[in-house]
Amino acid sequence: MSTIDSLKDRTTPVFSADDVTVLFVLGGPGAGKGTQCERLVARYGFAHLSAGDLLRAEQARPDSEFGELIRDHIRNGLIVPMEVTIALLEAAMRQVLDEPTAVTDTASADKSTGRRKGKFLIDGFPRKLDQAVKFEEAVVPARFVLFFDCPEAEMERRLLERGKTSGREDDNAESIRKRFRTFVDTSMPVVDYFDKQGRVVRVDATPAPDQVFVDTQAHLAKRLSDDVVPS
């Protein structure tokens, strides 16, 4: 994993956008990002990297220097320091690019250059504007934000239902409302930032998952080439 110090100092992306396609996947907690990402992986062969899952895995790793810090931030609905999250994402991307058989069709080699190519859905990131800027500066520029837009009341209903079986500490009413406020205050400015650059694909996430996926496919077909999302 990249060290925190090297990330802070880095001003040139480690991957080329010509070789590595990244879509940031955003939406409020309970908008259905994970479900749609699973379907996009199955249909198009993206690698799905969930920032939240990576943080939870690091939190649980016995010798992690960041475990307690991550645990406290997640429990209180706060955003983990960006260098930790970006370092985990970069390490996960490198692992996929180095081990192309891990996800079917996710990574391949350009025979003319020998460079590794890959395509990634980064789910639940960036959650703050400084994260977006630093990731694009130090790792790779994203193509666009795939934003699943869903009313807060519907998201709360979904999360409370999920909480009955998920076992997640943050699937309770108090934590859910903290997460909503954090999302509105910190993540919506990210969506607005990319929207002003014409780099947001907005999908209505209120309907059933099947319909949301049909709509998502239609949007991606308009924005990405056939080698990324074959028809």
Image (cartoon, grey):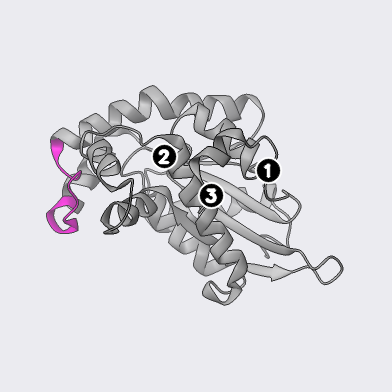
- 164 vs 226, left or right, is left
Q: Is residue 204 visible?
A: no
- The disc, 1 or 3, on the residue closer to the chain's N-terminal end is 3
Q: Secondary structure at mark 3?
A: loop
Which residue carries the number 2 mark? 27
Note whether 18 is above or below 72 in the view shown: below
Residue type of the residue flagged with mark 3 = Ser
* CA gap, disc 2 and disc 3: 27 Å
Reply yes or no: does residue 166 show up in magenta.
Answer: yes
Residue type of the residue flagged with mark 2 = Gly
Q: Where in the figure is residue 76, as x and y percent of width and height?
A: 21, 33
- 17 vs 149, left or right, is right
* CA gap, disc 1 and disc 2: 25 Å
- 36 vs 117, left or right, is left
Q: Is residue 59 visible?
A: yes
Q: Where in the figure is residue 141, as x and y percent of width and height?
A: 66, 41
Which residue carries the number 1 mark? 13
- The boundaries of the magenta stretch are 163-173
Rendered residue at 32%/53% (across/down): 64
* Name of the residue lying farthest toward the bottom: 101
* CA gap, disc 1 and disc 3: 13 Å
Pointers 2 and 3 in contact (CB under 8 A)? Answer: no
Q: Where in the figure is residue 200, as x and y percent of width and height?
A: 59, 36
Which residue carries the number 3 mark? 2
- The disc, 2 or 3, on the residue closer to the chain's N-terminal end is 3
What mark, if any, has residue 83 been given in the picture?
none
Q: Where in the figure is residue 32, as x and y percent of width and height?
A: 37, 49
Q: Secondary structure at mark 2?
A: strand
Front residue of this view, candidates 163 and 83: 83
Front residue of this view, candidates 73 and 163: 73
